[in-house]
Each structure stands twice: as C-alpha cells, then as structure tokens.
Amino acid sequence: MEKIPVSEYNIVLGKITDSLDEYIQQAPDSSLFILTDENTYSYCLPLIQKVVQHRKHYIYKIRAGELNKNIHTCMDIWKAMTTAQLDRNSMMINLGGGVIGDIGGFCASTYKRGIDFIQIPTTLLSQVDASIGGKLGIDFESFKNHIGVFNFPIAVLIDPIFLNTLSLRELRSGYAEVIKHCLIADGDHWKELSQITDLRSQDWAAIIRRSLEVKRKIVIADPYEKGIRKLLNFGHTIGHAIESLLLETNSPLLHGEAIAAGMIYESKLSSRYMGLSMKDEEQIIDYIEKIFGAPPVFSIENTIPIMKQDKKNSNGKISFSLLKKIGDSQWDILLDESQLKDLN
Ligand code: NAD
C-alpha cells in the first residue's frame, strides 16, 4: 500500500480491503453511507462488503450515467441521508466513477454543512483524474459541472482491481486523461505510452501511478485553479462543448471520448497559435485516432455558444490550454471566434 499525500489528504494506492479498513477505523462510532450506482452496486460493492459488514452502514444506489449527475439525483441522495439520520460524524463512501465521486462528494459537502467522505474511484478516468483535486458538483441544464464546490475527501483509495469489470469502452474513455497528462507535463513518458495499443493487458497500477502524479503536482501547486491547474483543461474546452452538444442525441459520447476529440482539435490550435511542431501534432492525432478512431462529425460553429459559457473565459474570448510541444503546455490562451474557424 502506497500513501501519496495531496495537501490535506492521502491518495492510497493498493488493496482496497486494507486501505478502507484503516480509514473507517479512524471513525469507529460513526455511520457509513455508501453511494453506488447500479453498476458499482453489482460489481464493486461486493469487494468492500467484508470490510463494512460489521459497521452500521447504509447503501444507496442511483442510476448510472452522466444524465443523472443533476440536482434531482442530489435531492434523492440528501433525502436518503436524512432518512438514514446521518449526523455530522457520519462518513460517506463514494464507490464509483467520476459521476458518483462528483455528485457524492457534492452531497457530502453540503449535507448539514458537510460530512467526511472517502472517494473510492472505480473507473480509470476517476482513478487518474476525477477523484483527485477536490472539484465536486453536478451538471445544470446543458452545462457540465456548472454547480459545485471545491472540497477535499479524507482519502482517495485507488485499487486497479476495480478495472477488471470495466468495459473496454469505459477503460478507453479514462485513457484519454492518461494521454492528456502525458501531453501537458510528462513528455518523457510519451514514447512508451504511445506504444500502447491493447488496453486490456496493461500494468494499470504503474500507469495510474505515473499519470496521477501529473495531476497531483498540479493540484498541490494550484488547488483552486487560479493558474497552472488550468493546464488540465487541455482538450476540455472543445471536448466539453462536443460532449454537451451530443449529450441528448442518439449518439452521446463518454467524457473521455469527447476529450480525445477535443485534444485533436486543440492540438490543431496548438500548432496554429503556440508553435507546436507539425511532427508533434501528427504524432498526437495519429495516436489518438489509433485508440479512439476518427472524431465524431460535428460543426465547430455549433460548439461556440457552449464554449462561450465556459467558466474560464475572459473579455468575451474563449480560454484554452494549449501545447507548446509534447510534455509542455500553457494556460490562459485567449482566442476569439474567428480564430476557431476551419478546424473541421
Ligand atoms: P461514470 O461515473 O459514469 O462511470 C462510467 C460507467 O462505468 C458507469 O456506467 C458506471 O456505472 C460504470 N462503472 C464504474 N465503475 C465500474 C466498474 N468497476 N465496473 C463496471 N462498471 C463500472 O463516468 P467516469 O468516466 O468515471 O467519470 C466521468 C465523470 O467524471 C463526468 O461527470 C466528468 O465531468 C467527471 N470528472 C470530474 C473531474 C473532477 O475533477 N471532479 C475530472 C474529470 C472528470
């Protein structure tokens, strides 16, 4: 078991039964409230049941998927917490992917002005990204993560064993964030990473460890996204807009799939405006297309009104984080609409 400190809390990488036992022992008299979705209820809960079975605990299951990361689900969760008579010493355990971590952390942070919570991320995306850094919240109308708070769990417990039941499509979605971390700040890893094609047969513990280190360093340096943390938005300005645009269509994208497409378009912007070499641009696009296939068909014009709502914009311009080269990036690049023409 490795304990990796992030400001106020630890990420613990290792066997979930050992790490969870240690943390719940720290609050011996409090009730546990375990939030799952329908898939993590079936696939992940059995892996922790032995540890929690001797403790007073409640299990609450929500429907799976991004469409449920909204205020209506929060109300259901707050109601269940109230019915369970959780007090301020109770502890919430968020067992699931980024949706469970975001909404569960948000509900824990607001219930009775905040109770302790543990994140147990069960998707690759949440293990390398969503569970680290304290951003919690929900979508509002068509805007992603529009309502939320910064708050920190008491621990993030990562065990790659959960990935065994994850579909290949979900695994690939999380891999987009692994690629992103490498591109923005870990150029030395690119050669090795870009050789990976078969996602099923990887040493995930090692890949997760390396990838989360990029995010960890960045969130320690800038916990509230005033500066360097904005680098993590590479691929996300256009990616989020594509994700929102397709969310309620017949072919919605997974978060990482949208970010993969976003990284393709933002690599093109990087070569136009940040001096990313054509060679780097080609390598990035080739590799992303090898893993994810060609990006979905959409019109960049239709994403502009969505990008204009982005929290990071300033003076009517859209804010991007772009690459100078593989492994080196810059934030707060403000572009106007006309500079986004002819991207697709
Ligand atoms: P998700 O939580 O919807 O999980 C994806 C799917 O996998 C779901 O159907 C889930 O039920 C299923 N699942 C989860 N674990 C499983 C397992 N071990 N075995 C089988 N099935 C399993 O989505 P995600 O991709 O993990 O996360 C995406 C969310 O994370 C988005 O809402 C995004 O906005 C958010 N996010 C947040 C941050 C942050 O800093 N807070 C960062 C990145 C992404």
Image: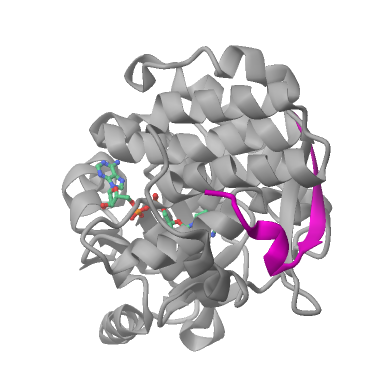
Q: Could you say where residue 29 lies in the image, as x and y percent from the top left?
A: 42, 66
Of residues 138 and 320, the one nearer the viewer is: 320
Image coordinates for residue 296, horizontal then vertical, percent: 37, 47
Residue at 67% over, 49% down = 232
Looking at the picture, tell me which residue is in the foreground, 224 or 145: 145
Q: Is residue 200 above or below residue 322?
A: above
Residue found at x 18% / y 57%: 38
In which image quadrant can residue 141 be found?
A: bottom left
Q: Residue at x 20, y 43 (%)?
A: 43
Is residue 336 highlighted in magenta? yes
In the rendered structure, the answer to whether residue 29 lies left or right of residue 33 reads: right
Residue 16 in picture, x, y percent from top left? 40, 37
91 over 199 or under it: above or below: below
Q: Residue most toward the front?
A: 342
Is residue 287 visible in this depiction of the protein? yes
State the residue at coordinates (52%, 12%). 195
Residue 154 makes an appearance in the image: no
Quadrant position of residue 194? top right
Which of 202/121 is in front? 202
Task: Residue 142: name its quadrant.
Answer: bottom left
> Which range is magenta?
327-344
Residue 129 drawn at (x, y percent)? 55, 46
